[in-house]
Image: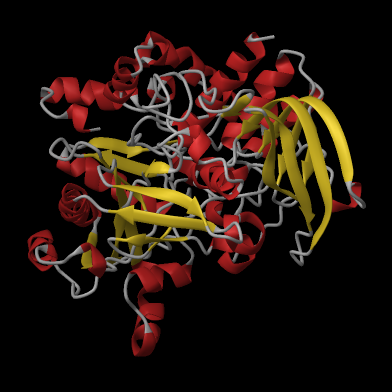
Amino acid sequence: MSELKGLSPEAWRRAIAETIGPCGQPGYPTPDPLALLQPAPPAAGVEAVPTDREVTVEVVVVGGGPGGGSAALALCAAGLDVLLLEEGPARSYFRKNYAHTARYHMQEAGTMVARGSAMMPIAAGRGLGGSSLVNSALSFRPPRQVLDHWASLLDDPTLSFDALQPLYDEVSGIVGVGITRAEISGENNDLIVRGIEKLGLVGGLAPRGTPGCVGCGVCYFGCPSGGKGSTNLTFLPRATQLGLRIQAEVKVEGLLVEGGVVRGVRAVTVDPHTGARGATLTVRAQQVVLSAGAVGTPRLLWHAGLGPQLGPHTGEHLQVHPGSTIVAICDHEVQMWKGATQGAYFHHPDLPGVLPHTFSAPPEACLVAAGFLGDRWQEGLALLPRMCGMLLMVSDKGEGRVRAFGDGRADLVYNFADEDVDRIKRGLVEVAKVLQAGGAKDLYVPIHGVPMSRDPEALAAHLHDRTIRDFTLYAAHPMGTCRMGARIEDGVVDRQGRAFGLENLWIADASVFPSSLGVNPQLSTMVMGTRVGRALAARG
């Protein structure tokens, strides 16, 4: 979002308003969950492949998340015979603890860590719904300048902001994007909104794809109320009604390649409870769509030995929207784990490419983020009801890469750009101002060597000499690792998502983004998945 630099204040406000979409306009109807959300689709599990088996279809889609689900719907709507393969469980397993969520619904059980400038965990979901199962469903559209840059870079006007808006409208309608409703926002979000209004900043309650949200605040562990527009309740049910078949609990480990042409995939069943490997499933297909995510897709390609064939950009340019968090103490009860998850946001005109939004987390995560560990645990427990928080992410200039270890696990590297570290520090100071303007007082950041601060200026002074190795890091927006390009020297796939290096191979997930998005990627991943699916279907 560095393209926002240099805009006049009014032009800047217009550019940010466009990221909300029509749901931010007065009179926009509240999405109806009963009309939008459908029961999770039927899916076969390991029991459906008791012995080695081979099937033939027109198209096989690998991955049931935002990219794979949207691509599958587009393909089925065109009348194609489609089989979707998903590594995760055939049904969702939700409980209010991270260990359970990681076991069933995170890639590599939530253990992926990038080395480089600093050790940084990188999260990616799995299961029917993928990351949409375990995210907050924030649904911003990329700024006009980002999409227009893509259109210019690829010499493709269909990628411009204006050209893509009808597709963003369509996808937003499917998942029920609307502004967080005041009755379920909760005090953590409301405090932030008060601070934004007091400081005259652009922001407020955020757009989220959660038409049936009841404000239970556990989106990261799965939606127990079934009110989130995750892929398993939106795209996939619609696709199964059009003929989509789903085989879950199978891990794709290789592609069938004959003379430079992809002819299908090879997978093995994996018991969702024990991890035990079982029978082999071979799927022969006329076309293969990889939608395993910006970590999972290049990891598969490299593990299958196909990275070099797809060109020098395979697994390169990993970007993740890194950032940090502030937890603050109020004089009144907040109970930050109650209310809409990440239901408020703001933009600061001096920090283009920095997006702060609500930090919502279970109590134990709040205590860790605020540094109440060891002998301070009891102190933290007493303060817990009065904690509030925000996190911020930056549209990163830093980059990393994805490869695969010999056993197939992700080999991740990420190196921070100095500019990004500076923007994180400056962003934290602005977040502190918003929190205190809303009613918070003492400020805590999970950064080594930075004590509690009672004013933003003191926090800025403490942050000045800190390096990225002092930060407690976490990222959940991997993208860009199989980016679109005009030719194989520039990217892994063309403007429509078709691979350069191998025939009959397509990629439809956040890995195809040509640059850092600057906003939460779910909505854009669905747009790209739909676009790729329709491009493939149009080939006949």
Say which quadrant the N terminus sits in: top left
Position of 419 relative to 521 (above/below)? below
- Please state if 455 lies on the left or on the right of 369 as rendered: left
Position of 163 relative to 363 (above/below)? above
Residue that lies at the very extreme toward the bottom in this rendered image: 375
Residue 404 locus on image (x, y percent): 53, 54
Residue 134 locus on image (x, y percent): 56, 50
Determine if residue 16 is in view: yes
Nearest the eye: 131 or 438 = 131
Position of 345 relative to 360 (above/below)? above
Say which quadrant the C terminus sits in: top right
Nearest the eye: 481 or 449 = 481
Instruction: Residue at 9% x, 63% y: name it.
Output: 464
Number of numbered tags placed on the structure image: 0
Nearest the eye: 75 or 349 = 75
Residue 176 locus on image (x, y percent): 56, 29
